[in-house]
Image (cartoon, rainbow, N blue to C red):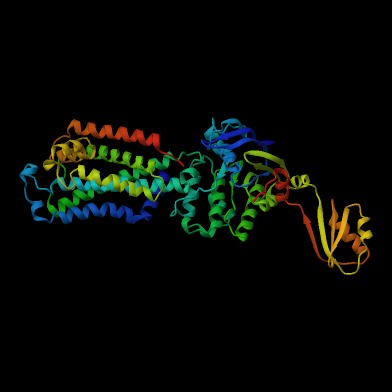
Amino acid sequence: MKVIEVRNLHKRYPNHVAVHDVSFEVAEGEIFGILGPNGAGKTTTVECVSGLRTPDGGTVRVAGIDPVAERDALRRVLGVQLQSSALPEKIKVWEALDLYASFYPDPADWRALLEQVGLADKRDAQFGKLSGGQRQRLSVALALVGKPRVAVLDELTTGLDPQARRDTWELVEQVRDSGVTIVLVTHFMEEADRLCDRIALIDSGRVVATDSPAGLIARVGDEQRVRFRPSAPVEDSLLTALPEVTSVSRSGEQVVVTGTGNLAPAVTLALAQQQIIPGDLRIEQATLDDAFLALTGRKLA
Amino acid sequence: MKKILAVETKLLLRDWPAIVFSLALPVGLLVVLGQIPDLSKPDPEFGGQRFVDSQLPAQMILLALLTTSFTVLPGVLAAYREQGVLRRMSTTPVHPSRLLGAHLLINLGVAVVAVVLVILAGWLVHGSTPPEQIFGFALVCLLGTAAMLAIGLVIASVAPNAKSAPGIGSVVMFPLMFVAGMWIPREIMPDALRMVSDYSVVGPFINAMRDTWAGDWPQLPHLAVMLVGLALFGGLAVRLFKWE
């Protein structure tokens, strides 16, 4: 079932067009990524979905609700964590949750939510004293306190250290497992790859492609490279005979095999049959960065 | 709304120096200035009243109102806009205008405290009588506070960021205190200045406070100027205020 439908969204600002033409659909229960470089129109797109901006063209529906015409109805089904929106420095964690819970007719139990996002021991800490990761966790909790069907998370991990980023990713997966559909806005390829079921690649206000991460990568060709140092000499013919292999080259002691499909298992199996151990085995695959480069001619980051 | 009010009051009290300063300065000045012998003698310029009887307390009430309305309120609101507090709230079913409403109510509360403290200090330290036409005085204070808060909202609307808001407030505040007669009482102002004073919202506010202090009802022109000021700046604030 489609929870969000965006058709031909268009949004102008006085001096430039932020969103030219964006269309996508988000299915119930998925993590849908909106991936693109800074200034691609990602945030404007989700602001239109969240009813914070009025589109200049196109239609937006969230659970059948028109975000502009039915402001209140939208806010009961949609929780939003916005980039660059903070809380007063001196508000305590529990006060913020208690306050935001009071904004909804049927809120979640914020104490349980506090446990879920791992901030139970920061209950009485002031917002200004929280670390970046803790602020984002609180922000996610605030987006969930109204028991939304859909949560929009904008640039959730920007500015976080790698550990905090990984912890936040786990939290996002937990939230999805609890039945909330998630729209994740990001410019991190790794984040989109790890979390998203499907991704809309956005560039200069237009959707370049919408697909699963693997599907997007496959569009640039699923060429892969396997590198290893063999424990005994290897004949090229042993490897080129495999249907997955397209070419074999050598650099010093290293053998570099290029191919498609299940290349790595095929190569290691063939080597094992000759009792050759591939040392320092490395598999190189195309990434979302490569896909973005191939689809737009520009680098993602 | 109750919860917003409770949380915002707590937050303001956690930032207590600003509030304490806006209350302590006028009360302190009232006590100290009242020690100057010339100011505590009956003066024919004031119809035989002492300066400390109603002129000084009225000015000090104005000072307290101006400090909270022109610096504290715009500072908080501009910071909330800058940090995205208003923006975050607009993603919930409750419109951020409730937050603004809570701050207006809190400021009204602070104004009541300021008025009570100034009257109490004047009474205890200088033996000044409290306002005699109490209902008229309450009406004048309410109208004056509302007009000051409306101007404060306009300042919050035009301030580009949280740092500049209190500064802009101070820049507007000092000329207003001047025309209100903080340094030259209205009675000895040159005619031109007195005319400016009479249309400056703060001038009529001081005069109406002094009238009611002495037991008279406030004069209609005074109330009218304050009402026009309230409508004008209130309308301007509604048009200019940006939520993000």
Q: Is residue B193 visible?
A: yes
Q: Nearer the viewer, residue A280 or B122?
A: A280
Image location (x, y in percent) of residue A166: 64, 57
User: Which of the 4 image quarters holds residue A69?
Assistant: top right
Which of the two residues, B241 or A17, is positioned nearer the viewer here?
A17
Quarter of the rendering containing residue A242: bottom right
Side of A256 where B173 appears, left or right: left
Q: Horizontally, is B174 left or right of A155 in the view?
A: left
Left or right of A36: which side holds B14? left
Q: Quadrant of the N terminus of chain A?
A: top right
Quadrant in which residue A255 is drawn? bottom right
Residue A82: horizontal and vertical position, in percent? Answer: 54, 46
Look at the picture and state if B27 lies above or below A25: below
Task: Give me the residue at 44% from left, 51% from top.
Answer: A88
Residue drawn at (25%, 55%) of the image: B24
Image check: B71 left or right of B26? right
Nearer to the camera, B125 or B209:
B209
Residue A230 percent coordinates (x, y) = 87, 67
Q: Is residue B111 among the parts visible in the rendering?
A: no
Tally of numbered tags? 0
Q: Looking at the picture, how far across and down is residue B14, in whole percent?
A: 38, 55
